[in-house]
Image: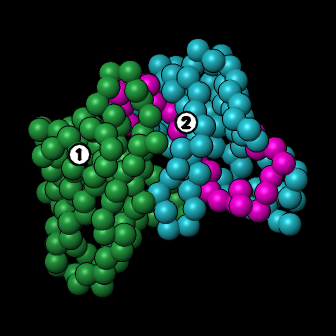
Chain colours: A green, B cyan
């Protein structure tokens, strides 16, 4: 199966600092990666769609200047939470789909628990 | 846009019983319906999926059924085991590569021995 690696798994930071989360597809090329956010006991909410080599597409209500997404290669996408505040504390999960026009399966990373003090 | 409703939100069963989780979707253009299992503190894992040209799919103790006309699909787990305890999410998408999944709100399944 396809493996998506996400790091770090847990991060605690002070309010006002920036945090970078990495998402890598280990054994396949991912044209598109997605970033989701999940609150405790809630569903996964799509934040943005990231295509390799182009700007990310953000969902309504998601601040693109706060959540910077970079997808510089077919195996790596990063999410940077800038000037983090306690309300940004959440579980962030990335997912990736293979670079294929017929494969719609999404594979998820293990998630990053962000706690902003 | 697509909206996915999932029921029940919690489900408790005895070991060996069957569990059924139901979802409905709103966008008739959706044609790919995966189910994910998520354990505490981990990312979701794909357990089974179905495409709109199929009415039913089975994989050992897990099966999924799809009714396109009614726009609903269900997950069936037979002979439940304690390790089946987790949160289960249904999702829908238009099934093209690069298309995001829209998730239901999840069902917390508890299997007691």
Q: Residue A112: which numbered mark, if any?
A: none
| Residue A110 on image: x %, y % | 42, 60
Given residues A20 and A2, the one toward you in this image is: A2
Q: Which stretch appears magenta?
A: B76-100
- Location of mark 1 (residue): A75
- Location of mark 2 (residue): B34
> Residue at 27% of width from left, 38% of height from top?
A29
For the question of whether residue B5 can be seen, the reply is no
Q: Does the magenta stretch include residue B40?
A: no
| Residue A50 on image: x %, y % | 23, 42
**Tag 2 secondary structure:** strand
Chain of the residue under label 1: A
Q: Do labels 2 and 1 share a chain?
A: no
Instruction: Reply above or below: B22 against B10.
Output: above
CA gap between label 2 and label 1 equals 23 Å
How crowded pointer 1 is (Cα within 10 Å; few <14, some 14-19, many 20+) is rated as many
- Residue B78 left/right relative to B62: right
| Residue A55 on image: x %, y % | 13, 41
- Residue A76 left/right relative to B92: left
Q: In which quarter of the image is residue B24?
A: top right
> Residue at 18% of width from left, 52% of height from top?
A69
């Amino acid at each position: 199966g396809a493996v998506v690696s996400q790091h770090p798994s847990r991060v605690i930071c002070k309010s006002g600092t920036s945090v970078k989360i990495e998402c890598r597809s280990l054994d396949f090329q991912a044209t598109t990666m997605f970033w989701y956010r999940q609150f405790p006991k809630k569903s996964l909410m799509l934040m943005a769609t990231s295509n390799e080599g182009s700007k990310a597409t953000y969902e309504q209500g998601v601040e693109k200047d706060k959540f910077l997404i970079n997808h510089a290669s077919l195996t790596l996408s990063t999410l940077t939470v800038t000037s983090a505040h306690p309300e940004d504390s959440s579980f962030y999960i990335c997912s990736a789909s293979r670079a294929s026009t017929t494969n719609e399966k999404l594979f998820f990373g293990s998630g990053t628990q962000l706690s902003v003090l | 846009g697509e909206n996915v409703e999932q029921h029940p939100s919690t489900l408790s069963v005895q070991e060996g019983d069957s569990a059924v989780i139901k979802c409905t979707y709103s966008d008739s253009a959706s044609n790919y319906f995966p189910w994910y299992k998520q354990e505490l503190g981990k990312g979701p894992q794909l357990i089974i999926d179905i495409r709109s040209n199929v009415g039913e799919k089975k994989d050992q103790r897990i099966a999924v059924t799809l009714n396109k006309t009614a726009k609903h699909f269900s997950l069936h787990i037979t002979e439940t085991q304690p390790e089946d305890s987790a949160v289960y999410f249904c999702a829908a998408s238009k099934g093209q590569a690069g298309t995001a999944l829209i998730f239901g709100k999840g069902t917390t399944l508890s299997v007691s021995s």
